[in-house]
Amino acid sequence: MMIIDLNDVLVENYAEIELDFEEDIDAIKTEVKGILRNINGVLQIKADIKAVYMSECARCLKKLESHIEKTVVESIVSVDNKEDEDDYIYEGKTLDLERIIK
């Protein structure tokens, strides 16, 4: 799980924290670099995600290393302000980034 402590970003409007870490998600090495910013109580994330995973060639069954890179730009609302089932939410002073990153 990628749990982020929100204490420093929720203290004031436009506060931000830098994201720069690596973690295994479902046995896939994942690197996250970006910014998490508070804009009027709605958190905005912009992050570059890089992942490396192992697979097999369908033809020869040789092991292959594959790379994925993507940029994530999302809004995250407090659980109290959730309007849609697909909204990304945070509760209290923590945020689990795993659903956003996947």
Image (cartoon, helix red, strand yellow):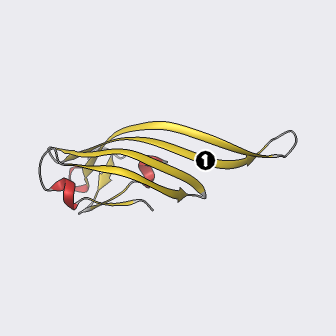
For badge 1, the amino acid type reads: Val
Q: Quadrant of residue 96?
A: bottom left
Report the residue at 25% width, 48% height from top: 77
Nearest the camera: 72 or 31?
A: 31
Q: In the shown orientation, is residue 18 left or right of residue 10?
A: right
Report the residue at 43% width, 54% height from top: 21
Q: In the shown orientation, is residue 72 left or right of residue 25?
A: left
- Circle 1 residue: 52
Report the residue at 61% width, 58% height from top: 27
Q: Is residue 80 above or below residue 45?
A: below
Answer whether residue 86 is visible to the viewer in this image: no
Answer whether residue 24 is visible to the viewer in this image: yes
Q: Quadrant of residue 90?
A: bottom left
* Residue 26: x %, y % from top left: 58, 58
Helix, strand or loop for disc 1: strand
Q: In the shown orientation, is residue 30 left or right of residue 15?
A: right
Report the residue at 70% width, 45% height from top: 65
Q: In which quarter of the image is the N terminus?
A: bottom left
| Disc 1 residue crowd, few under 14, some 14–19, many 20+, Cα 10 Å | some
Give the residue furthest to the left.
12
* Residue 41: x %, y % from top left: 17, 48
* Residue 79: x %, y % from top left: 26, 55
Q: How many marks?
A: 1
